[in-house]
Image (cartoon, rainbow, N blue to C red):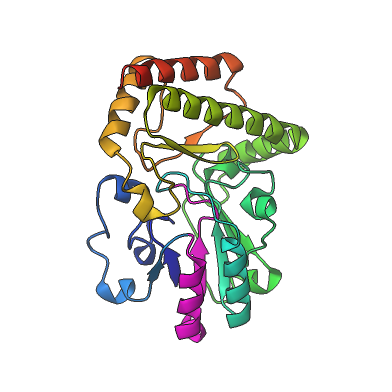
Amino acid sequence: MVKFAGCYHGHADGFLVQAGSGALTMGVPSSPGVPEEIGSLTEILPYNDAAAVRRAFQKEGDKIAAVIVEPVAANMGVVPPKQGFLETLREVTTKASSLLIFDEVITGFRLAYNGAQGFYGIEPDLTCLGKIIGGGLPVGAYGGSKEIMEMVAPEGPVYQAGTLSGNPLAVQAGITTLQYLAAGNPGIYKELEKKAVYLETELLQAAEDAGIPLQVNRAGSLLSLFFTGSGVTDLDDAVTADEEYYKKFFGKMLAEGIYLPPSQFEALFLSIAHTEEDLEHTISTARKIFNNKI
């Protein structure tokens, strides 16, 4: 398997090597208890590095079963894909007869109704989805082509089951949520994009006016604030941002009633429930804190 440093794909042994999310927040490079033999089957590459992907496939493409990726990384903070990165993944996996897996637990139905794969026009072989399909309740799903899904029991030999599989409450909540989104598509996503662009622009301006180095990474309604003077395109860039500065900013915003992601390496999610007044309050509060040099 190939994964990318800083991407988080759940609590499976092979994916807990250089993971993002809580593991990155707590400074755990790889989770203890994962056998070296399992870790050795996972190759870690830098996110957004198309050249590294090509080198890996040139070296051992015939041994690579699959590449799994967050199409927009959101567990090292939000890091959108560079132009051509996802296209390269699709190209090399197709050529090597490897699978391309999009982890859309965060981007699914949030970036667009058809997810990041629709937003960027890249069709993966498998897609993973999370709580969004349960209206926020605990449920997950994966899907792909008929050929692949026929490998799953009872049609095929790959067994999969779970305590919450088909949970009626989560499924009904998910159906209702997705029907609501479908009925409002594309208006809902246009509204989210407008709000997100405004928030990004105003936060950057407020920081610039106060002389504070700030990068705002955004993809659709996903945003992250990095207190750094240089761009953030991968995990190495993300960890150079001033995390202590972010912690202070988070605490002062929280004291004003604004709950940002508590970790530098988590994403800020805008919602259609956020009003213009909410945005103005967020921006004016951030400006005040920036002006006080945090």
Q: Quadrant of residue 128?
A: bottom right
Query: x and y percent of residue 43 in the render?
Result: 39, 72
For the record, the magenta segment spans 48-74
Q: Is residue 220 left or right of residue 224?
A: right
Q: Nearer the viewer, residue 294 or 79?
A: 294
Q: Is residue 201 above or below residue 241?
A: above
Can you see residue 160?
A: no
Give 34 or 265, whichever is nearer the viewer. Answer: 265
Q: Image check: 86 left or right of 249?
A: right
Which residue is depicted at the point 53% across and 31% down?
A: 200
User: 234 or 10, which lies in front?
Assistant: 234
Report if residue 79 lies within the magenta region. Answer: no
| x 30%, y 23%: residue | 251
Q: Is residue 53 left or right of residue 180?
A: left
Query: Horizontal and vertical percent for residue 281?
Result: 49, 14
* The C terminus sits in image quarter: top left
Q: How far across and how far down the image is residue 31, in percent?
A: 26, 59
Q: Residue at x 65, y 35 (%)?
A: 177
